[in-house]
Image (cartoon, rainbow, N blue to C red):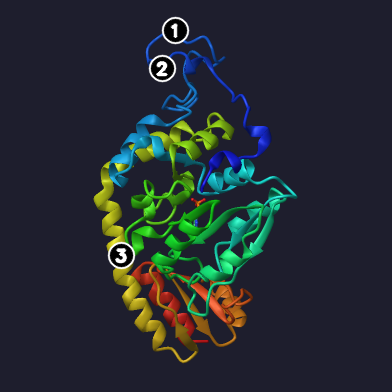
Amino acid sequence: MFDLKGLIRPHLKDLVPYSSARDDYKGNDGVFLDANENPFGSITKENWNRYPDPYQYELKNKIGEIKRVSADRIFLGNGSDEPIDLLFRAFCEPGVDNVIINPPTYGMYKVSADINNVEVRETQLTNAFDLDVKSILDTVGERTKIVFICSPNNPTGNDVTLSRIEEVLKRFNGLVVVDEAYIDFTDRPSFIEKLNEYGNLIVLQTFSKAWGLAALRLGMAFCSQEILGVLNKIKAPYNLSGLTQRTVYNALENIETKDKMVDDILENRIQLKSDLECLGIVERVFPTNANFFLVKVRNASDVYRQLISKKIILRDRSKVVLCEDGIRITVGTKEENNALIQALKKL
Ligand SMILES: *Cc1c(COP(=O)(O)O)cnc(C)c1O
C-alpha cells in the first residue's frame, strides 16, 4: 500500500519550517512592525513594500475554481521547475534513492535529479512513444521514489495511453508525477480528476504555455493534502512574488482570451502540418496533442543550423533517443509558420 510517511526523507520528518509573525495574524489592516519592511512605500508606482502571501490563498482559490479542485490541493511554484526540484529535495536521499523517467522526454527531470545527486533510471518509451509499463515496473527498486510521466510528451507531442498511466499509479507504491504542461492543447481530460482515487498522484501544469505567461514563472502542482504539507514545509517562505500573484489573479478574468489563443494555435497547427508534409526534406510529421510537432527531416542538424543563420530558431532533437533526425517545431502565428515554410523551401 502507498504510505507517504515511508517515502519522505528522514531528516525532514521533524523539520520545523520558517515561521513569520504573519502566521499569527492574518488580517490586512494593522500596524505592521514585524518584518523590517519600508513603511513609506516603494520606489515603483505600485507599492510592493510588504511581503507577499506565502501560501497565495487568493490566487489558489481562483485557480481552484477554474480547475475544479480544492485550493488545499494546489501548490504554486516559481515555474514547474520549483515543484520538480522540491519533490527531489523532499523524497529523494542523494546517493541512495532513485527516480524513473521515460525518454525521450522533458529534460528538466534529469537536470533536477543531477543537481540533487539522485540516480535517474531510464525506461525508454515504445516505438510509438507510449509508456512501457512492464519495463517501468521491472525497473522499480527498493529505493525508487518517483516515476515521471509527461503527457502530452515533450518532445514527441503525443499523449501516452491514459490506462497505462493508471496502471503505473496502481502498481507502483511511490509517487507518480503526471506532467500536463500541454493539457490545454489536447482533448483528453486532466488527471486532476483522479486525485481522489490515487494518493500517490501529482499533476503538474503551468502558466508558461497556453496562458502565455512564461516570463512570470508560475507552475502548479495538484496533489493530496499530505503531499502538499510536505512541499509547503520545505519551500522558500515567499516563493512567489507579489507581482506574479497579483498579475495572474487579474489575468484569470480573461480566460476567453486564453481559449481564443489556444483555438488559433490549434487552427495553425492543422495548416502547419499540411504545409510541412508538402516539403521534400520532411520525412515525417509525428501526430501531436501539443502546440509543437516533432518532425523528421533529412540532415536535421544541418537544417537546424541553416535556419538559425536565417534567424529562425527550432529545437534540434536529432541526438535524442527515438528522435533521430528529429526537430521540434513550435506552432507559431500564421506569419511565423509561413516564414518557416518559405525558408525550408529554399534550403
Ligand atoms: C515547458 C514545460 C514545462 C513548463 O515549465 P515552467 O517551469 O512551468 O515554465 C513543464 N513541463 C514540460 C514537459 C514542459 O515542456
As shown in the figure, which amino acid type bears the numbered disc 3?
Asp
Q: Position of residue 59 (x, y in %)?
A: 37, 35
141 vs 267: above or below: above
- Which quadrant of the figure has residue 261? bottom left
In this picture, residue 59 sits left or right of residue 155: left
Residue located farthest toward the right when viewing the structure as drawn:
95
Could one spot residue 220 in this view of the protein? Answer: yes
Tell me the residue that label 2 is attached to: 26
29 vs 218: above or below: above
Residue located farthest toward the front when viewing the structure as drawn:
1
Q: Which mark is residue 187?
A: 3
Question: Residue at coordinates 44% horizontally, 7% vertically from top-left?
Answer: 31
Query: Marks 2 and 3, Cα distance to the nearest angstrom?
Result: 41 Å
Tell me the residue that label 1 is attached to: 31
Front in this rendered view, residue 234 or 214: 234
Q: Which mark is residue 223?
A: none
User: Is the residue marked by circle 2 packed among few (<14), some (14-19), or many (20+) residues within 10 Å?
Assistant: few
Q: Position of residue 114 (x, y in %)?
A: 70, 54
Q: Are marks 2 and 1 in contact (CB under 8 Å)?
A: no
User: Is the residue marked by circle 1 packed among few (<14), some (14-19), or many (20+) residues within 10 Å?
Assistant: few
161 vs 197: above or below: below
